[in-house]
Image: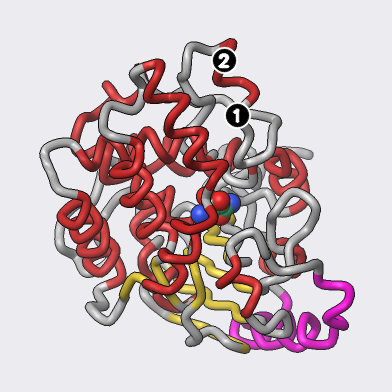
Amino acid sequence: MSADLETIVAEIAAEMAAVPVARRGVPASYIPELAKVDPGRFGLAVVLADGQVHVAGDADEAFSIQSISKVFMLTLALGKIGDGLWARVGREPSGNAFNSIVQLEAEKGIPRNPFINAGALVVADVLLAGHAPREAIGEILQFVRYLADDDSIVVDRAVARSETETGFRNAALANYMRAFGTITHAPELTLGVYFHVCALAMSCRQLALAGRFLALDGRHPGGRGRVVSAERARRIAALMLTCGHYDGSGDFAFRVGIPGKSGVGGGILAVVPGVASVAVWSPGLNAVGNSTLGAAALEQLARRTGWSVFAPPVQSPIDGAAR
Ligand SMILES: NC(=O)CC[C@H](N)C(=O)O
């Protein structure tokens, strides 16, 4: 690393701040509440495995985490029903838009993966089992608060309401899967859980802290035992790499080389195993619904730190070998 991390984070934020708003992409507008967000915002937070935090820009401003919540929902659902979940949702990239319905008809109502909307609706349905929607939402909120060790995290009710009023595609997905039996509750109940969890409002700092268990091979950052087994943490990260950016996942893996999960609020949570958890936020989206500057900032961070899941481990057997 040529410069120290504090400097790298500050430099990247300054470079991103200089990008004209017109070149940042457009904030999501199909959820009307999200269209109100200032497209000029940019935040970056890096939490190292040892707990050191480096932030820059609007890293302490809460934004709508949207699909990033799918990582937390998946983690909880796996804790609940274990690998039985994989009978109801697949583990392959979809190669389609996040809200696409096309594969469901030919694939018996089983979504390709838990990070597209159809897959996350199945996960929400699993989390709803045995609960009223309010209880399931409360359980997920408590889980995220426990991960970030921050009880101030809340659901943005205006965003949840906005999506409830306009989420016709998600309603179509839920109803379609109810017909196949992959959704087991009344679709409006499962949708209620999904919309409220997508509406979690978190800052980059809170999000990076909440994702740190994945950088710690499944351990709780506060030394409070395990959140998940090491195997499960690695598998969740593998799914983030292959499916976390929808049909932009290949490009993100190519450019950044780190598992990441995006949301239409403009956030991305990225995990460097054993090293760091990173959250970035810029509301302007590219054509596939991922944050334009968020990916650019992570690409720069990976380049300047050398972080990559494809880099040889520090104690690699090839170190010292003739090259
Ligand atoms: N990509 C996203 O963040 C999508 C989440 C959003 N709540 C939706 O269902 O459309």
In percent of the image, x 34 and y 57: which residue is there?
213
Q: Which residue is mark 2?
A: 105
Asked if the stretch drawn in magenta spans residue 149, the answer is: no
- Under mark 2, the amino acid is Glu
- Under mark 1, the amino acid is Ile
Distance Cα–Cα, label 2 vs label 1: 8 Å
* Tag 1 secondary structure: loop
Q: Quadrant of the N terminus?
A: bottom right
Q: Quadrant of the C terminus?
A: top right
Identify the image quadrant of residue 268: bottom right
In percent of the image, x 54 and y 39: which residue is there?
116
Label pair 2/1, CB-CB below 8 angstroms: yes
* Tag 2 secondary structure: helix
Q: Colour scheme in the image? A: secondary structure
In percent of the image, x 46 and y 20: which residue is there?
110
Residue 10 drawn at (x, y percent): 67, 88
Identify the image quadrant of residue 286: bottom right
Q: Is residue 108 above or below residue 169?
A: above
Q: Nearer the viewer, residue 308 or 251?
A: 251
Q: Residues within 10 Å of mark 2 (few under 14, many from 20)?
A: few
Q: Is residue 124 above or below residue 104?
A: below
Magenta span: chief secondary structure = helix
Q: Which residues are magenta?
A: 2-24
Q: Is residue 40 left or right of residue 230?
A: right
- Which numbered marker is on residue 101? 1
Q: Is residue 24 left or right of residue 68?
A: right
Q: Residues within 10 Å of mark 1 (few under 14, many from 20)?
A: many
- Please, which residue is most extreme toward the front here? 165
